[in-house]
Amino acid sequence: VAGDTTLVKIFNVNTGKMIEAEVPTPNGAVAYLGDARIDGVPGQAAPIALTFKDAAGARTGQLFPSGKSIETIAGIDGTCIDCAMPMLLIEAASLGVTGYESAAELNGNHSLIERLEKLRILAGEKMGMGDVRSQVTPKPVLISPARQGGALNVRYFMPNECHPSLATTGAVGIATACVSENTVASRLIGVQTPPVVLSIEHPSGHLDVKLQLRDGKLVAGILRTARRLFEGHVFAKPAKTLVCAA
C-alpha cells in the first residue's frame, strides 16, 4: 500500500499479459465503498482503473491471427482479432438481425445461434486455434452503429449465449478493432485515432475504453469497481508430529 492509490500489477495466466490496477487505498487501507457505477452491475462501489498493457496476441501471438484484418467466412465478412480475448467480429446486418435486440431475443433465435457457432468454428481454424468446438474462444460479436451517442453498438456471445452486458476483455478487443485499419468495426465507423475514449453500447448500457499509445504500444484503460462480498475465518487442526523409532 502506497498513498491514497496503490498500483497493483496482475499477471494474467490465461494470456501471459500484464494488467495494472489502480486501487484506492486512503489512509493505507483498501476502500470498497464509493460512487462509481458500471452499466450492467448493480449498485455503487469503489472505482478500480484497469490498464491492459500490450494485450494484442493474448492467445495466438498475433493481433490478426489469420493474417488479414477482414476475412470472408462462409460468405460473411468478419474480423478475426486476438486482443485480450480472441474474437470474431461480424456486422449484425449481414446475419439478418439489427444488433439492437435484447440478449433474450438473440438467445431465442436458434438459427442465429447455430449459424454463429459454424462461423466461430471456421474462424478458429483460420486463427490457427484448431478445432474450437470444445473451447469458449473465439467469442462471436455482432456489431452495429451506435444509437445512444457511443462509438459502436455490440452484442457479445460467450460463445453460444449473448452476454447481458459486455466483458471487459471483449471491450478491449472491440475498441482495438476500432483504431485498426480495414476491420469490420473501423469500416463501419471510420478508423479512430488514439488517444481516444470509445463508448461501446451493449444491452445494459455502455462501457468506456480509453486507448492511448505508451512507448509505441497501444494500451487500453477501463473503469471497473471493487466491493467486499464476504469475509470469514478458517480454523485448521495443528499438524500431527510423527515420531519414528530409531
Image (cartoon, rainbow, N blue to C red):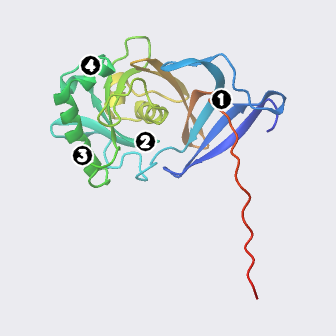
Q: Position of residue 93 (x, y in %)?
A: 22, 22
SS category of the residue bearing label 3: helix
For marks 1 and 2, give the CA distance.
27 Å
Q: Residue furthest front?
A: 245
Disc with the residue nearer the chain's start (3 vs 4) = 4
- Amino acid type, residue under disc 3 in the picture: Ile
Q: Nearer the viewer, residue 9 or 40?
A: 40
Q: Nearer the viewer, residue 218 or 49?
A: 49
Q: Residue furthest bottom?
A: 246
SS category of the residue bearing label 1: loop
Mark 4 lies on residue: 105
| Mark 1 surroundings within 10 Å by alpha-carbon count, few (fewer than 14), some (14 through 19), many (20 or more) | few
For marks 2 and 3, give the CA distance.
16 Å
The disc placed on residue 85 is: 2
Disc with the residue nearer the chain's start (2 vs 3) = 2
Disc with the residue nearer the chain's start (1 vs 2) = 2
SS category of the residue bearing label 4: helix
